[in-house]
Image: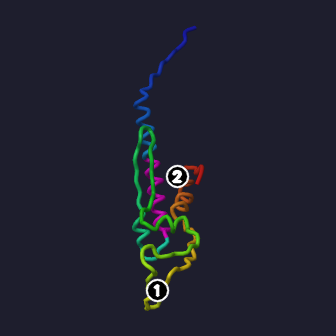
């Protein structure tokens, strides 16, 4: 009895390229959706935080990366929160600020801290399942 036989040689470079293209597309879709959701969830006072939201897509070897981030100087404090603390002047003898239209001088101020408002994390957690991604660790 004769046996039919076939041999399949795969071009591993071409297969990797196809996989990378699909990974790029999926990561780009997820990153864009997370960025859009983050813009909706960003706490707004002056709008500076929302404008500071940004995203970046890149590859390194056979890995596709997507990042959503905010580099406004106080973004981490708003996102992660901060403990109460005493604020004292660094170089002068007193702090100077305006309160209710009056200039106030104080040797120190007790700042009450800030509750975390993790809009970037929330955006990722809400978006990931719709795109088939699982968050392993926050």
Characterize the magenta stretch by its predominant secondary structure.
Answer: helix
Quarter of the rendering occupied by the N terminus? top right
Which of the two discs, 2 and 1, labels the residue nearer the N terminus? 1
For discs 2 and 1, the disc positioned in front in the rendered view: 1
For the residues marked 2 and 1, what is the alpha-carbon distance in whole angstroms? 54 Å
The reply to whether the C-beta atoms of the residues labelled 2 and 1 are less than 8 Å apart is no
Q: Helix, strand or loop at disc 2?
A: helix
- Image x and y of residue 72, in percent: 42, 66
- Image x and y of residue 25, in percent: 43, 47
Q: Give me the residue at 43% from left, 34% from top.
A: 16
User: Which label number is shown at residue 105?
Assistant: 1
Nearest to the observer: residue 13 or residue 46: 46
Judging from the image, the colouring scheme is: rainbow
List the single residue furthest toward the top.
1
The relative height of residue 11 versus residue 41 in the rendered view (above or below) is: above
The relative height of residue 57 versus residue 17 in the rendered view (above or below) is: below
Nearest to the observer: residue 103 or residue 125: 103
- As for residue 28 lying within the magenta part, the answer is yes
- Image x and y of residue 131, in percent: 52, 52
- Image x and y of residue 53, in percent: 42, 63
Task: Report the residue marked by disc 2.
Answer: 131
State the extent of the magenta-drawn residues as a range.
Answer: 25-42
Quarter of the rendering occupied by the C terminus? bottom right
- As for residue 124 lying within the magenta part, the answer is no
Nearest to the observer: residue 77 or residue 64: 77
Q: Give me the residue at 49% from left, 84% from top.
A: 106
Find residue 55 and report its image quarter.
bottom left
For disc 2, the neighbor class at 10 Å (few under 14, some 14 to 19, many from 20) is few
């Amino acid at each position: 009895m004769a046996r039919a036989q076939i041999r399949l040689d795969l071009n591993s470079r071409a297969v990797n390229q196809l996989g990378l293209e699909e990974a790029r597309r999926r990561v780009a879709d997820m990153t864009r959706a997370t960025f859009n959701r983050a813009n909706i969830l960003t706490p707004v006072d002056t709008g500076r935080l929302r404008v500071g939201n940004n995203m970046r897509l890149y590859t390194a070897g056979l890995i596709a990366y997507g990042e959503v981030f905010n580099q406004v100087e106080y973004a981490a404090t708003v996102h992660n929160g901060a403990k109460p603390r005493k604020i004292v002047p660094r170089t002068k003898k007193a702090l100077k600020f305006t309160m209710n239209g009056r200039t106030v001088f104080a040797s120190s101020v007790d700042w009450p801290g800030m509750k975390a408002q993790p809009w970037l994390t929330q955006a990722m957690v809400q978006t990931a399942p719709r795109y088939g991604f699982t968050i392993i660790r926050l």
